[in-house]
Amino acid sequence: MSREPDRKEIHRLVRARRKKGAANDGVPGEEILGDNVPGPTPNPSTNLLLADIAMRMGTYVMRGGIERAFLRNRYGSDLANDIVDNRSIAKTLSAIVVAKMAVKSKVGAALVGTGLVGKVLYDHSKARRAARRDGDATLLGRVDEDS
């Protein structure tokens, strides 16, 4: 069984690699990396940026598809598209902020999770017909605002 190196060992290895590269031609780590940088460009920083943008775009597209799929069974395809497309900037930004808070820390995840469970329990405690009427009015109001 091989053990993972601790922080001090990693720092020692990084310093050793930098010294080897500096002895060659003044470019730190050049002999370690060579020209074999994976990705579409030879610049690792640009490759990281491209990967980040691609992942964010993918999650954005996937999120929209999932939202439409949740609404499609009840409201139909065209109305589901209108509902998702007519969301206000404030609701979109608040969803992003809450998701970031949940991802960044365990406390944030606990707070957001508790809030979601509370909201689900609250919605279930309301009468079914009243909840359905309120939800329909809210979503259909978004469509009417745009029309």
Image: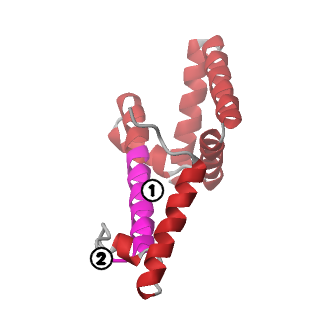
Q: Residue at x 30, y 76 (%)?
A: 35
Please, what secondary structure does the residue beneath circle 2 have? loop
Residue 145: where, in percent of width, then height?
57, 50
The circle on residue 56 is 1
Judge whether 29 appears above or below 115 on screen: below
Is 117 covered by the magenta stretch? no
Do the residues under discs 2 and 1 have CB atoms within 8 angstroms? no
> Does 40 sit left or right of 92 as displayed?
left
Label 2 to label 1: alpha-carbon separation: 28 Å
The circle on residue 35 is 2
| Nearer to the camera, 3 or 104 | 3
| Nearer to the camera, 38 or 134 | 38
The magenta stretch spans which residues? 42-63
Residue 117: where, in percent of width, then height?
63, 21
Q: Residue at x 45, y 68 (%)?
A: 49
Judge whether 118 appears above or below 8 on screen: above
- On the image, which quarter does residue 126 sit in? top right
